[in-house]
Amino acid sequence: MSTYVYGITAASHPSLPQDTTGVGEPPRPVRVLKAGELAAVVSDAPEDLRPKRRDLLAHQNVLSEVGATGCVLPMRFGSVAPDDAGVTGVLTERAEHYTERLRALDGKVEYNVKASHVEEAVLHLVMAENPDIRAQAEANRKAGGGSYDDRLRLGEMVAGAVKAREGEDGAQVVRALEPVAAAVSSGPESTGWLVNASFLVDRDAAASFLDAAEQVRRDMPHLEVRVNGPLPPYSFVEPGPSEPAASTAGADAGAG
């Protein structure tokens, strides 16, 4: 039977409660596979695994349980190996890498930050900042709305100014949060977000990070800023080409 992988820990990591369960219906019992100084938190893999809410939460809950008592390198939802031997084989093969990552991520959590423009607020901002846009808007107003070409020109000017602000504002958000983070990882670009970044934060600095995010909201009221965390450090595991499992469902249990 295939083996579902939740995460990687040190072999000395405290044991999980015996009744811990994970994905599947009924939920599969969670167990630990050890190889040298490393261990993998696993269960049997359901044959029909899909990124359903119940299973996404089960994956996250197992990682939260493990992470509550020490460092864990989280695997993405849907990580499945052919069998137990396949998991322990990769733990052995990649022992140096995973041991280094456990040391680097010990005592740290991830916060994902997304930001987008509040449309009306950013339009007011670019109008206030750009005299050429104001002049074109005023000329159109005096001309009863202006010609088609005049309206098109104004729209292009506004769109260009907003696009420029996206880059500036995104960089400013990251600059404001970087000083209270140990590392930053840029997430994939997605429509509607001018920032999608994950920050690696010392647990002891979590309050300072959240305070910094709140300061960003106060300083940049034309942005909507969303903070998701604390999360296991998904974006900083860096499993490399020989990660212990291949994703079969393609969903990220830590996405926000």
Image (cartoon, helix red, strand yellow):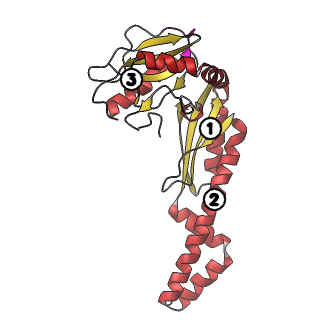
Residue at 64% x, 56% y is 169
* Magenta-span inclusion, residue 11: yes
First reached walking from the N terminus: tag 2 or tag 1? 2
Q: Quadrant for the N terminus, please.
A: top left
Instruction: Give the SS element for disc 3.
Output: loop
First reached walking from the N terminus: tag 2 or tag 3? 3
Q: Which residue is mark 3?
A: 82
Q: Which residue is mark 1?
A: 199
Callout 1 amino acid: Phe
First reached walking from the N terminus: tag 3 or tag 1? 3
Label 3 vs label 1: CA separation?
33 Å
In the figure, is residue 92 to the left or right of 104? left
Q: Do the residues under discs 2 and 3 have CB atoms within 8 angstroms?
A: no
Label 2 vs label 3: CA separation?
44 Å
Magenta segment:
9-15
Q: Main secondary structure of the magenta part?
A: loop
x then y, percent, for residue 207: 64, 31
Q: Which residue is mark 2?
A: 167
Q: How many numbered circles are shown? A: 3
Badge 3: residue crowd in 10 Å (few <14, some 14–19, many ≥20)? some
* Closest to the observer, 226 or 188: 188
Outermost right residue = 179
